[in-house]
Structure formats: structure tokens, C-alpha cells
Amino acid sequence: MATRLPPVHALSAFEAAARHNSFAVAAEELCITPSALSHRIRLLEEHLCERVFVREGRSVTLTEFGRRYLDVVRGALRTLSDFPLPNKIAQNQLRVKVTVPPTFARYMFMPRLASFTRQYPEIEIEVFLFVPLYDLSLSESDVEVRFGAGEYPNLVTRKLFVEPSFVVASPAYLKTLPAMQTPTDLRHAKLLRSALEPWQPWFEVAGLDWPEPTTGLRVDDLGLLLEAIKHGHGIGLTRQHFAQEMIRRGDVVRVFETQLATPPHSYYLVHEAQANIRPEVQLFIDWMQATFQQA
């Protein structure tokens, strides 16, 4: 029996292409490439040993067999979609999938998310984590927050905010060093490294002609970098939103007044083209921009 059944994904591709008279539009609806949709149609035709479409340039029309077969396919798909599934979540549930970096999620996103859920209790939020600078392909999420230079081709990219970076250390670690009176005194310290917060731009602002450090502990997570600073592994760069609680408690202290006003990396809101955005996703995007511009 199974060998006589056509692939279901090929049937849905056939139905969408017949409804739109276009492989390109059908592919966009199914969130696949036009070549992938063409492959599915060829797979169906090979299974049926019949042509279902006549290709004429960029347009497609159904063959006589294709028109008859479309009625059967639509009936079968309708039967499957109408079959009651008592344990399945209602199909009209509004949901937004958002991917965020861990430190941003912990210090900035989660403390503010309640304001969105209060405004839109009917929209469910699903949160996923990814590693900044490394996981660069847009996942199955609707929206991503990325920490980087903001260069993401073919995606809508919006800077959320700009926050200066500055130097902090634990009081205990500072006691092991000569007095930190000017930036040049950093030559006595262990500089904690991170691809997310490079030192060289801060050096330039501080008037230091120093290269980027190449030795010492490296931590490519901003939250873990702060923990390493707190536990006295060295001196590092951070930002106000992340460090403010540790500064308030006295776990870390700001070492110099010098700060980098526009660091090379910032937080960006990233998503697909505006035409593909669902209404609930647009509400979330608008909320993110308003919330973090105020922050």
C-alpha cells in the first residue's frame, strides 16, 4: 500500500502551485525555494508517470490529467485537515518564536517580557538561545536578536540600541595590583579577552597604541565574562545593563571613566522581509523596538 502512495509534501506543493498558477508564489507560501518546489513536482510526476503541469516560461498551467488529479488531491487534503484532533493545540493559536543571545535573554529580555504578555495575552512566545557571532543563519524563529556588526544580507536589520562599553574589575583583584590611576596601568593586569568585546577599540579611545591581546583567559559569552571578572580572573570590558546589579552590590567596580561610546558590536533585531511577517510577529517587533529604544 505504501509504495502506491505519493509523497504528501509533493501533493501540497502540487496543490499550492495549481492554486497560484506559479511555482515561485507557491514556494514562498510553503517557505521553500522555487527549485525545491520544482523538485517536488517532478517527484510527483515520476510517481504518477504523468505530467500535471505544462511549463511555459515562468507560467504553469495544469494538464488535463492535472486538473482531474487536483480534484482528488484537494479532497484528500481537505479530509486530512478537517479530521478532528482533540489533543492538538488549536491551529489559530498565535505564536512568535524568538531567538536571543543568552546574556541578552537573562539581563534584558526576560525582565521586560511581562509587559508584552500583559498587552497581548493571546500571543504565546517561544524563546530559543544561540551563540553570538557563530550561529548566523536565520533559524526557524520568526525574529532574532543578534549581537554583532549588523551586516546580515537579505534580512531586515534594525539596531535596538547603542550602549557604551567600559572597564570593570572585582575589588579583590584590584587589591593585588598597583593603583589603577590611568589606562596605561592596565599593563600590570590580566586582560580578559572576548570576541564580543574586543579591547583594541577601547585602547584607541583611551589613547593607548596597544594591539588586541592574544593571551589570557578568553570567554565568548558576555554573562560568563562578567562572572570571570567577578571571581577575580582579571579585568574586562562590559556594559551598563549587564553590570549594573553587580556594580550596585559591589561585586565589580568601574576602573576608569574612559568608555567606548560606539562599540563595534551592538544588538540588532533581525527578521525576514516585511511582506512575510504575520500580524502577531509585527506586534512583537514593534514592542521590541519601542521597549529597547526606551531602555
Image (tube, grey):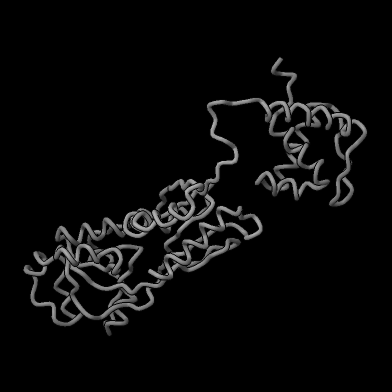
Q: Is residue 246 above or below residue 90?
A: below
Answer left or right for 9 relative to 19. left
Residue 195 on image: x %, y %: 35, 63
Q: Quadrant of the C terminus?
A: bottom left
Give residue 91's position: percent from left, percent from top: 59, 37
Give the farthest residue toward the bottom. 207
* Front-lying residue, 189 or 71: 71
Q: With respect to residue 158, does 106 lie above or below?
A: above
Quarter of the figure with residue 213: bottom left
Asked which quadrant contains residue 80, the reply is: top right
Compared with residue 153, is residue 204 higher up or lower down, i.e. above or below? below
Write the residue at 47% across / 64% down: 268
Task: Answer above or below: position of 201 versus 86.
Answer: below
The image position of residue 41, as x and y in percent, is 77, 37
Residue 152 seen in this snapshot: yes
> Relative to residue 176, is residue 36 drawn left or right?
right
Report the side of 72 relative to 170 (left or right). Answer: right
Query: Residue reaching furthest right?
Result: 64
- Residue toward you, 31 or 185: 31
> Can residue 190 be seen in the rendering of this structure?
no
Point out residue 88 in the picture as x, y percentages from the top left corner.
55, 30
